[in-house]
Image (cartoon, helix red, strand yellow):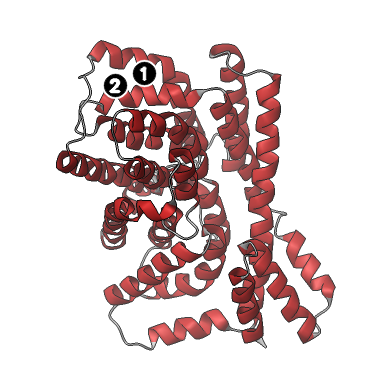
Amino acid sequence: MIWIMVISFFLLIIFGVPIAFAMGASALFYILIEGIPLEMFSQRFFTNTQSFAFLAIPFFILAGNLMIQGKIAQRIINVADSMVRQLPGGLGCVSVVTSMGMAGVSGSSVADAASTGSVLIPEMKKRGYNASFAASINASSSVVGIIIPPSSTMIIIAWLANLSIAEMFVAGIIPGILIGIIYLATTVLISIKRGYPREEKPTFKEFLYHIRKASWALLLPIILLGSILLGIATATEAAAISVVYALLVGLFVYRSLNWKNIYSSLKETARGTAVVMVTVCTSMIFTWVLISEGIPRMIANALNGLGLPGWALILVLIAIMLVAGMIMELVPNLFLFIPIFFPIATDIGMDPIQFSIVMLVSLALGMFTPPVGATLFISCFIAKIGIEKTIKDIFPYFIAGILVVLLLAFIPILTLGLPSLFQ
């Protein structure tokens, strides 16, 4: 009967049903056929939300929304502009560095793509950049939003895999910066080849001026991580602190918040939290059915039975996750793969924190690839072009992203070096 659930799940996806509802409906179909009491469905659905760690998700989303509504993006863009605009393809480089800065503020790739792209993509088009190139840079670089902390996706991974949220946050810093640097290099190389313009070299005085203007926003991730690592607050408490900080900065320092955009922030937070939690709940029911039928262990045994060496098995897992990231949303993929792949990774001696980051980055690459790439859809909408026109420009960034995944998989210090300093 398990195959009926799986087949119905893919049929619902083919007919355009959102992933979260497809997982919930197919799991409910299985429960009805098997005669399992419906109380089990409702119990599994709601009990998954009763986690103190999950309380951090709406707080992080709200803090990010308050910062974005408070016009923080432009201040961070100005800092990035005064750092890298003199490089070949200056505005493209600014887009990459801005995404890295926004990641520490919003914790959301989709929010980064929208806030950064709405400013830089039209400007890049005015300066003679190809629209598909502008959209591709924005879509690909914004994936660091869920890798550089804070990240609600990391909270879900930590909860599913029973890991420390603080360690996950710290482990994501170097990988996020590494992705940014490699995407920056990719942008420079493409810009040199195509002859995209450099901008006027900024002065050090200008750089200091913009740093000072954005300093309150840039302090947020430092305060957040510092409070967690120093044991002052848990991740959930730090998330609540970040909301208060964002509110105070927006109201009294930048004076860019008012009751109207505070209300908008609350509304967007409610919507975003609902989307995340519904996906979590339906994914958990779907995963519970798979686990109860022994599917994860069956797949794990099949992969282990291939007799591959550890390094080759890791490559197989990465390949599967890269493909899955292209065709399914990130959070449902986490619920599917963590029960299956974590035992395999730990059996061959890979650290759970390291594998978590490898999994996160592998699946995150799907956010800027067709057919379900959320940041790609947003970027193409802003650039006013079809998704199919970006494939040529997206490809170099996807390959660069795979290179980062391989580095993270086979060089443990990139993910485990910083966490080890705080143990």
The residue singled out by tag 1 in the image is 211
* Amino acid on which the number 1 mark rests in the picture: Ile
Q: Residues within 10 Å of mark 1 (few under 14, many from 20)?
A: some
Query: Where residue 224 appears, x then y in whole percent?
Result: 51, 33
Foreground pick, 208 / 195: 195
Foreground pick, 372 / 48: 372
Foreground pick, 263 / 223: 263
* Amino acid on which the number 2 mark rests in the picture: Ser
Q: Is residue 158 left or right of residue 15?
A: left
Query: Which label's residue is closer to the chain start, 1 or 2?
Result: 2
Query: Where residue 260 appears, x then y in whole percent?
Result: 70, 22
Residue at (51% x, 67% y) in the render:
338
The residue singled out by tag 2 in the image is 82
Mark 1 → mark 2, Cα distance in angstroms: 9 Å
Foreground pick, 102 / 419: 102
Query: Where residue 157 appears, x then y in whole percent?
Result: 52, 57
Query: Where residue 358 appears, x then y in whole percent?
Result: 38, 59
